[in-house]
Amino acid sequence: MDILGSSSKSSLVTSITEEIKDREPPKKVHDPGGVWKCCHCRLEEHYDYKGNKPPFAKHLSFSEDCYIMKDPFSSLNRGEILILGGDCSICNRSVCLECSLFYAKRFCKACAFENSRYFPSEVQKKIHVLNKENKADE
C-alpha cells in the first residue's frame, strides 16, 4: 500500500535535497598555534599552525593535517618549516614523527601495532621496529 502518493514522495525528496544544498559545509578555522605534545614520548613544543597548507609556506601542501612550526634557525619569511607531527587516524591522539608511521594516514605506534595485520608486509616490518623501540624506551 502506498501511503504517500508519487507527487508527495517527489516533493518530500525535493525539499530534503534543497535543505541539504542550503547547508554550507563547515568552514575550516585557522588554527593560530599553541603548545603541542606527543602522547607517546612527551615531546612538547610550540607550533604555529595545524593543517595541510601553512600560510607562511604557501609553496607547500601536505596530504594530512600536521602540527607545523616556523623553522627558528632560518631567516624570516623564507617559508622554511619543521613538521612536529600529526594526529593518529585511529585514536586521534597527537604523535610526533618518531612515534608514528605514515601510510596513507598517520598511525601512532600503539594503533599501528594493534592493526599491523592490515598493513603490507614491508610496512609490518617497520611497525615491529617501532614497537621494539617503544619497549626499549619504557
Image (cartoon, rainbow, N blue to C red):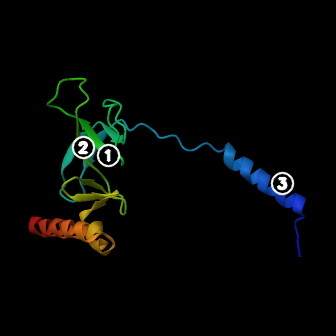
Q: Residue at x 87, y 59 (%)?
A: 8
Residue 119 lies, in percent from the top left, at 31, 69
Residue at (34% x, 35% y) in the render: 54
Residue 39 % position (x, y): 25, 57
Callout 1 crowding tier (Cα within 10 Å): few <14, some 14–19, many ≥20: many
Residue type (three-letter) at the residue carrying disc 3: Ser
Please give the residue where the numbered disc 3 appears in the rendered image. 11
Which element is circle 2 on? Answer: strand
Sequence-earlier tag: 3 or 1 = 3
In the picture of the structure, the residue carrying the numbered disc 2 is 83
Q: How many marks?
A: 3
Asked if the residue at tag 2 contacts the one at tag 3, i.e. Cβ–Cβ closer than 8 Å, the answer is no
| Marks 2/1: CA–CA distance | 7 Å
Q: Is residue 135 above or below residue 36?
A: below
Q: Given the current orientation, which residue lies at the most extreme top position?
A: 76
Residue contact between numbered discs 3 and 1, judged by CB atoms under 8 Å:
no
- SS type, badge 3: helix
The residue carrying mark 1 is 66
Quadrant position of residue 62: top left
Residue for point 14% across, 31% down: 73
In what quadrant of the picture does the N terminus appear?
A: bottom right
Position of residue 47 measured from the top left corner of the image (x, y, whole percent): 27, 39
Q: CA distance from mark 3 to mark 2?
A: 51 Å
* Callout 2 amino acid: Ile
In the depicted structure, whether residue 58 falls above or below residue 15 = above
- Pointers 2 and 1 in contact (CB under 8 A)? yes
Q: In the figure, residue 25 lies in which quadrant?
A: top right
Q: Amino acid at mark 1?
A: Cys
Q: Secondary structure at mark 1?
A: strand
Gap in angstroms between the C-alphas marked 3 and 1: 44 Å
